[in-house]
Image: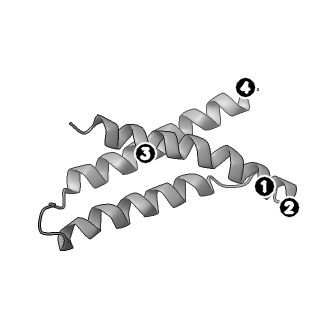
Amino acid sequence: MKMPHYNLTIITSKNTNPSLAKKLEESGLENPPYIGSIIVLAFATLEECSQCYIPSRTFDLWDLGADAVEVVLFSCLLKILLSKE
């Protein structure tokens, strides 16, 4: 079942974006990019690619693509929700 994997990606993006954005805004950067999403996507990519080197695991390009789609869609949704506040 892949849902726990996807939920972890979404929850991590949800938690890292606002906290990093707040810290970047405090340092004087206006409209900070979604650094949290970039970090989560980089980690998901590394994690998926590392499965090539673990005998009991298999690399799945569909998982990597799904992670990217999730992070992008959730980042867009988060941007919409935050802009309404």
Q: Is residue 22 above or below residue 28?
A: above
Q: Residue furthest bottom?
A: 53
Q: Is residue 34 left or right of residue 6?
A: right
Q: Amino acid at mark 2?
A: Ser
Q: CA distance from mark 2 to mark 1?
A: 6 Å
Give the label on residue 9, or none.
3
Q: Which residue is mark 4?
A: 84
Q: Which residue is mark 1?
A: 23
Q: Do tag 3 and tag 4 residues touch (Cβ < 8 Å)? A: no
In front: label 2 or label 4: 2
Residue placed at 31% from the left, 46% from the top?
Answer: 66
Q: Which residue is mark 2?
A: 27
Q: Earlier in the sequence, mark 1 or mark 4?
A: 1
Judged from the image, the secondary structure of the residue bearing numbered disc 4 is loop
Residue placed at 65% from the left, 28% from the top?
Answer: 81
Judged from the image, the secondary structure of the residue bearing numbered disc 2 is loop
Judged from the image, the secondary structure of the residue bearing numbered disc 1 is helix
